[in-house]
C-alpha cells in the first residue's frame, strides 16, 4: 500500500534544530490529483451519485412518506402507495426509506468508530513496537478469528439490540483489519529520515505521532475503509435479518426481508424493495471504493 509523502508534516531543520513547517503544496497536489482521477472513473462517479441519492432520500424522504410503523390490517397486502403494503398494512416504501436511514447511519457511524479505534491501536502498535506491538497484534488476530456476523451477534446479545449497539458491534468487527493497515503504514512511516530525526531530537511521542505520523498514514486507510462501507451496510442488514439488529416494529432492510419472506408467493415486492435497495447501495459503495483505490493508487 502506498502512502502520502511527508509534505503534510513539519520536518526538522538540521542547522538550528527547530521544526520548520513544510509547505502543504505537495499534499494538496496529491489530493487534487486523486480527485481528478476519481472524476474520470465512470463507475465511481455513478456509485457516488447513487449514494448521494440514498442520502437525500434518507434525509428528506420521511417528510413525504407515511409513518413507517403505522399499521392498518384492513389495508394489508394491497397495492396502495408506491410499493404497496406489508401484512400489517404498513407502507412498504415508507419502511424502505426508514431502512435507508438505518443503513446509512450504521455505515457511517460504524466505519468512523472502527477507524478511530484502529487508528489509536494500529499507530500505537506500529510506532512503539516490541511488546506493545506483540500484544495489540494478538488482539487483532483474536478478533479476526470470529466471522464478522458471529462476532456482531455475540456483542449485540451481550449489550442488547439497538441501532447504536449494532454500530458498535460492526465497528469492533472491522477494527482489526483497519488496525493492521494503520500498523503497516506506521511501520513504514517511522523508518523515514524525518521521523528518525525528530525522534533523535527528543520530541515527545505524542507530538511526533500527531505532527509527523498521523498526517501521512490516515488517507490510505480512510480510502480503504470507505470502500468497505457497503460490507458494513450488508452486515447491518444481516444482523437485523437474524433478529440481532434493529428491533421491530422499527424498519431495517434486514428485518423487512425476514418478515416478508413468508409472503413471497403473495407479494414478492415486500422482499424485493428492501433487497434491491440494499443491493444498489452495496454496489455503489463498492464502485466508489474501487475508484478511490485506483485514484490514489492504493492496494489492500
Image (tube, helix red, strand yellow):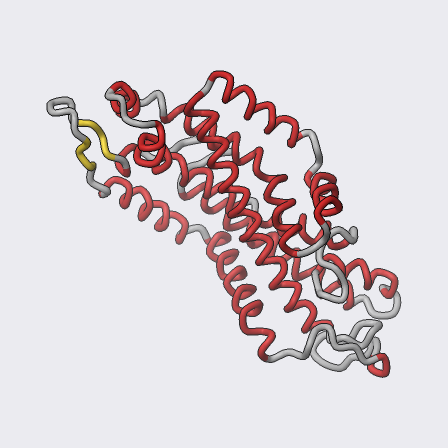
The number of discs equals 0
In the rendered image, residue 124, in percent from the top left (x then y), is placed at: 45, 28
Residue at 39% across, 24% down: 188
Looking at the image, residue 10 sits to the left or right of residue 144; the answer is left
In the rendered image, residue 296, in percent from the top left (x then y), is placed at: 40, 41
Image quarter hosting the N terminus: top left
Observer-nearest of 202 and 254: 202
Q: Residue reaching furthest left?
A: 15
In the rendered image, residue 181, in percent from the top left (x then y), is placed at: 49, 32
Residue 101 position by quadrant: bottom right
Residue at 36% across, 24% down: 190
Looking at the image, residue 247 sits to the left or right of residue 297; the answer is right
Residue at 67% across, 48% down: 235
Q: Residue reaching furthest top?
A: 130
Observer-nearest of 29 and 76: 76
Looking at the image, residue 53 sits to the left or right of residue 10; the answer is right
Residue 174 position by quadrant: top right
Residue at 53% across, 46% down: 113
Observer-nearest of 232 and 124: 124
Residue 66 position by quadrant: bottom right
In the rendered image, residue 227, in percent from the top left (x then y), is placed at: 53, 45
Compared to 274, does 242 lie above or below? Answer: above
Amino acid at each position: 500500500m502506498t502512502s502520502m509523502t511527508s509534505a503534510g508534516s513539519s520536518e526538522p531543520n538540521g542547522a538550528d534544530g527547530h521544526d520548520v513547517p513544510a509547505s502543504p503544496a505537495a499534499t494538496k497536489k496529491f489530493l487534487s490529483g486523486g480527485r481528478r482521477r476519481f472524476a474520470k472513473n465512470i463507475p465511481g462517479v455513478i456509485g457516488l451519485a447513487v449514494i448521494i441519492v440514498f442520502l437525500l432520500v434518507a434525509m428528506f424522504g420521511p417528510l413525504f412518506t407515511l409513518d413507517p410503523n403505522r399499521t392498518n390490517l384492513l389495508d394489508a397486502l394491497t397495492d396502495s402507495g408506491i410499493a404497496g403494503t406489508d401484512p400489517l398494512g404498513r407502507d412498504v416504501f415508507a419502511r424502505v426509506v426508514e431502512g435507508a436511514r438505518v443503513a446509512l447511519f450504521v455505515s457511517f457511524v460504524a466505519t468512523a468508530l472502527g477507524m478511530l479505534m484502529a487508528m489509536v491501536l494500529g499507530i500505537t502498535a506500529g510506532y512503539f513496537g516490541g511488546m506493545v506491538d506483540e500484544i495489540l497484534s494478538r488482539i487483532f488476530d483474536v478478533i479476526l478469528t470470529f466471522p464478522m456476523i458471529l462476532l456482531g451477534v455475540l456483542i449485540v446479545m451481550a449489550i442488547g439490540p439497538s441501532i447504536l449497539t449494532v454500530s458498535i458491534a460492526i465497528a469492533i468487527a472491522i477494527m482489526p483489519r483497519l488496525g493492521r493497515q494503520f500498523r503497516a503504514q506506521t511501520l513504514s512511516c517511522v523508518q523515514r529520515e524525518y521521523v528518525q530525526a525528530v525522534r533523535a531530537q527528543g520530541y515527545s511521542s505524542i507530538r511526533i505521532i500527531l505532527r509527523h505520523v498521523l498526517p501521512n498514514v490516515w488517507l490510505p486507510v480512510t480510502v480503504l475503509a470507505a470502500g468497505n462501507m457497503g460490507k458494513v451496510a450488508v452486515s447491518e442488514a444481516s444482523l437485523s435479518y437474524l433478529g440481532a439488529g434493529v428491533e421491530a416494529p422499527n424498519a431495517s432492510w434486514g428485518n423487512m426481508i425476514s418478515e416478508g419472506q413468508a409472503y413471497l408467493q403473495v407479494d414478492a415486492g415486500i422482499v424485493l424493495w428492501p433487497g434491491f435497495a440494499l443491493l444498489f447501495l452495496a454496489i455503489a459503495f463498492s464502485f466508489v471504493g474501487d475508484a478511490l483505490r485506483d485514484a490514489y493508487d492504493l492496494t489492500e
